[in-house]
Amino acid sequence: MNLEKWEGKKCDFETPRRKDNDSLRAVTLLLGLAIYIVEKVIAVNPELTPVKAQLRSFVNAEAGEFHPVSDPDIGFRGPPHLRVWTFTDDYQYLTESDEHGFPNRMPLPQTAEIEVFGDSLLAGVGVAIDREFSTLVGRALPIKGIVNFGNGGAAPNRQLMTFRKFGASFRPRLVVSCIYLAADLDGQLVFDSRLRDGAKGNYNEYRLALNDRLQPKSFWTFWSKVQRISHIAGKLTDLVLRWRGIPLRISFPSGPDVLLDIDSLRARAIGLDRQDSRMLSMIDSLKEMRALSQSGGANFLVVLIPSKEEIYGAPFMPEVMNQARVLEQCLEQEGFTVLSVYDVIRRRAKDRSAFFPHDIHLNAFGNQIVADALVNWIEKSGVLPTKKDLAKKGPSLFELTPTLAHL
């Protein structure tokens, strides 16, 4: 075979390969363009945006409004004397704080029959002070003062420090510690770690960094990162979970849908060992807080407040309730008086949400449910006088004074 014929055959051999490569590039380009278009369509259409992406966007926007003041003893507090309007897709409300940065109006009372401690669930997020459950309790009872020491991320160890620093001087008759299990287990661990490290630096930055490191490294962690990049991956996740019978969007006959966080559902579904260091530390803090309360003549009550994942995810993933059951049992074994509002919220909030659509906090209806449960417990326990008690005794001299003056 001569060279000219051989070169001709070589050219005939390479031409189809070039055509295949060009076709592959064209298909890849079209596929990439299609993915880009679908991503943009999903991103700008709220009805199509994946649940996880909506929740992440809300949290990021909300985080920009949080500006705590450093405190060497309790980590941080809210800014003092605050009066700022907050606007989000879920709510608009007036944020207010007292001279210490807690959600109370000035002036503070000299003494307080009730003091309430806990995390941001007590701060009136989304509903403002007037519709927050501690305020509603104060209005329902004939008491002179109730002080709210709600503080973002405050697990029992930070509540204990807050009681020592600010609460004891009010000489309360009832001290209430509120536990939000969805955040307080890890919150307890983080603040304990902070104390061991010498309580240096900005605690809010410290806790956020440590929380990231505490997240379990698994396939789901990797997939969550993929969903941050791709709305398509998030939408596929929503569809697969719905196919498996785990809807992340809960609808009600009236009012907006509530969105559930799949990562929070998975975290709650993990069993809680009775020797878990976080829970043991939490119980130790509560014991010390109870002892200090009782030494001042106050009763001590632990209130367990659920997350929306525990309330609305339990019908599809019953195991999300395991941790709450273990904690409640351990608290009762240690002799604590415990009021769990899980069942009453689940019962009363079947047809109407007790939570905001995106935000983790209780809405006005949810705060009213908790307030009613607390007032009901106080009336039954007899730890404080109620309006029914005053009605049985008849009007006081103070109440009769205007009548006497008129005569």
Image (cartoon, rainbow, N blue to C red):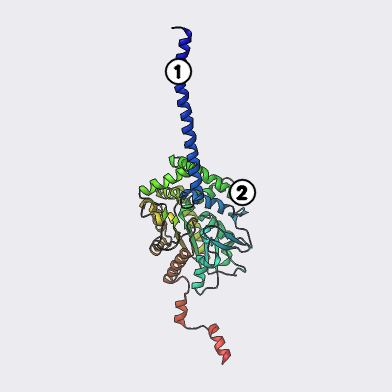
Rendered residue at 55%/73% (across/down):
144
Q: Nearer the viewer, residue 228 or 278?
A: 228
**Numbered disc 1: secondary structure:** helix
Point 42% across, 44% down: residue: 236
Residue 179 can be seen, yes or no: yes
Q: Is residue 378 above or below residue 152?
A: below
Please tell me whether mark 2 or mark 1 is closer to you in this view: 1
Amino acid type at mark 1: Asp
Q: Quadrant of the C terminus?
A: bottom right
In the displayed orientation, state which residue is furthest to the top: 2
| Above or below 304: residue 108 | below
The image quarter containing residue 17 is top left
Q: Position of residue 401 (x, y in %)?
A: 56, 86
Q: Position of residue 58 (x, y in %)?
A: 53, 53
Asked whether 394 or 356 is in front, the reply is: 356
**Image height of 10 relative to 18, above or below:** above
Image position of 318 (left or right of 87): left
Camera sees residue 188:
no
**Dot 1: within a 10 Å radius of its alpha carbon, few (fewer than 14), some, or many (20 or more) residues?**
few
Which residue is found at the position 51% from the left and 83% from the top? 396
Which quadrant is the N terminus positioned in?
A: top left
Pointers 2 and 1 in contact (C-beta within 8 Å): no
Labels 2 and 1: the sequence-earlier one: 1
The spot of residue 323 in percent (x, y) is 40, 52
- What element does badge 2 sit on? loop
Say which amino acid is labelled 2. Asn
Q: Which mark is residue 202?
A: 2
CA neighbours of label 2 inside 10 A, class few (<14), some (14 to 19), many (20+)? some
Quadrant housing residue 259: bottom left
How far separated are the C-alphas under marks 2 and 1? 70 Å
| Residue 12: assigned label | 1
